[in-house]
Image (cartoon, rainbow, N blue to C red):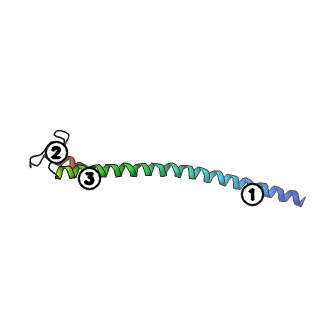
């Protein structure tokens, strides 16, 4: 009888561990999803800031970066379109 009780107790423990395992599995799944989202956002941010850096450089070298005159020479003149684009994206 004592042996049977021990088996029952072990079974119960095992079931509790399985439940706990299931909980942990769900938690890990959702953390992985969240992690993937964060990594994606990070790489989008990096690409965006690199692109902005290039455009700022282009503007400082004397070219338009606005959609109206893009890549045309500014001939040393400031451009309000370019400047507002930079201001919006800083
Ligand atoms: Zn411009």
Label 2 near ligand 1 (CB < 8 Å): yes
**Count of numbered tags:** 3
Left or right of residue 62: residue 32 = right
Which tag, 2 or 1, sits closer to the chain's start?
Answer: 1
Vertical arrangement, residue 77 with respect to residue 13, above or below:
above
The spot of residue 66 in percent (x, y) is 19, 43
Query: Is residue 90 shown to the viewer in this render?
Result: no
Residue at mark 2: 64
Residue furthest to the right: 1
Label 2 sits on a secondary structure element that is: loop
Q: Are marks 2 and 1 in contact (CB under 8 Å)?
A: no
Query: Is residue 51 shown to the viewer in this render?
Result: yes
Q: Which mark is residue 13?
A: 1
Vertical arrangement, residue 30 with respect to residue 10, above or below:
above
Left or right of residue 15: residue 45 = left
Graded by Cα atoms within 10 Å as few (under 14), some (14 to 19) or many (20 or more), the crowding at tag 3 reads: few
The spot of residue 6 in percent (x, y) is 83, 59
Label 3 sits on a secondary structure element that is: helix
Distance from disc 1 to disc 3, alpha carbons, whole Å, reads 59 Å
> Residue drawn 40% across and 49% down?
41
Residue at mark 3: 53
Looking at the rendering, the quadrant in which ligand 1 lies is top left
> Residue drawn 76% across and 55% down?
12
Graded by Cα atoms within 10 Å as few (under 14), some (14 to 19) or many (20 or more), the crowding at tag 1 reads: few
Work out whether residue 53 or residue 90 is closer to the camera in this orientation and state it: 53
Work out whether residue 39 or residue 13 is closer to the camera in this orientation and state it: 39
Distance from disc 2 to disc 1, alpha carbons, whole Å, reads 71 Å
């Amino acid at each position: 009888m004592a042996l049977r009780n021990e088996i029952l107790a072990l079974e119960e423990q095992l079931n509790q561990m399985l439940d706990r395992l299931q909980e942990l599995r769900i938690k890990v799944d959702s953390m992985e999803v969240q992690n993937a989202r964060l990594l994606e956002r990070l790489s989008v941010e990096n690409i965006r800031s690199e692109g902005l850096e290039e455009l700022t450089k282009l503007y400082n070298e004397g070219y338009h970066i606005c959609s109206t005159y893009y890549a045309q020479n500014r001939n040393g003149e400031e451009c309000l379109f370019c400047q507002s684009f930079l201001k919006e994206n800083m």
